[in-house]
Image (cartoon, rainbow, N blue to C red):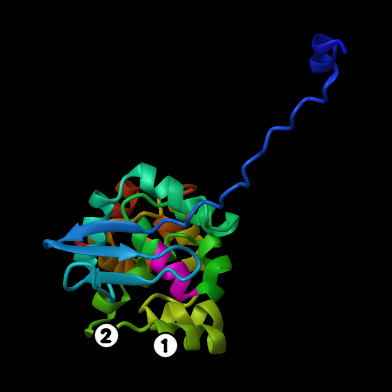
Amino acid sequence: MNTRLSLRTRAPRRRRVAAAIPAEAPVLTWIHDGVRHRVGAWPDVRFEREGAPGEWRGAEPTEAAFASAALGVGAAPWRRYLEFVPGAERAFLERFEFSRMAALQVITRCPAMLGELIDAPALMPFLALHRSLRGGDGSGWSEIAAVFEREGVFGVLTWLGLPASRQTLSILAHIKDPDLPRRLLEPLRSALWDPEAIWTLAHAPLLTDEQLAHACHALAA
């Protein structure tokens, strides 16, 4: 028997292909006032803070905690986190930088409002900071959901202290950077009630932070 010929004609061995291991959906972690905070993976998106080491409890983040998240969660962790988020929600979140964590909270607490938020993204900061804008300590997510279900987006505008009109939504839709700084929210809300300021804002094709600040400053003067 020709041993060499036998070896050459033997059927080649098949390589075993390892089964693909699904990637684990990530969480986002940051530190505020020396305490670790985190938000769970989509779709649960549970906000928590650490009590004892390794002991996590559900907690509603404060404005200051969201500000710490803006500094403590970098681009790479966000990029990996957003890989597990559906396309429409991911595209919306990517419009925000400083307040992206707050935007994540808004679209998961008010999922029925996603379409309205996509059309007018600058409405998001008003929803995110509704506690301080309206006064009071407790969050109003269930109340927002109930108002939206009964009265739609115009009911929510009224609840936030904004004029319930298409013009308000149009102005919010034409804000170039919807990642509005906290300092602009109350002055802008006041400006949206002033006829002269509304005319100025409504006739600008694209509203920058500078134009918004100018309109609010003119109203205050």
Across and down, in percent, residue 117 comes to: 51, 65
What main secondary structure does the magenta stretch of the protein show?
Answer: helix
- Whether 106 is among the magenta residues is yes
Question: Does residue 219 appear anywhere in the picture?
Answer: no
Which corner quadrant of the image does residue 199 belong to? Answer: bottom left
As drawn, the label of residue 138 is: 2
Total labels drawn: 2
Q: Quadrant of the C terminus?
A: bottom left
Residue at the limit of the structure toward the left, as seen here: 34
Which corner quadrant of the image does residue 29 belong to? Answer: bottom left
Question: Magenta region: which residues?
Answer: 104-110
Which corner quadrant of the image does residue 179 belong to? Answer: bottom left
Camera-nearest residue between 101 and 218: 101
Please tell me which of labels 1 and 2 falls first in the chain: 2
Pointer 1 residue: 143
Residue depicted at x 41% and y 63%: 104
Camera-nearest residue between 63 and 175: 63
- Whether 51 is among the magenta residues is no
Alpha carbons under labels 1 and 2: distance apart: 11 Å
Camera-nearest residue between 130 and 16: 16
Across and down, in percent, residue 205 comes to: 49, 47
Q: Name the element at disc 2.
A: loop
Across and down, in percent, residue 122 comes to: 42, 60
Residue depicted at x 29% and y 71%: 48
Packing grade of label 1 (10 A; few <14, some 14-19, many >=20) is: few
Q: Is residue 135 above or below residue 216?
A: below
Residue at the limit of the structure toward the right, as seen here: 1
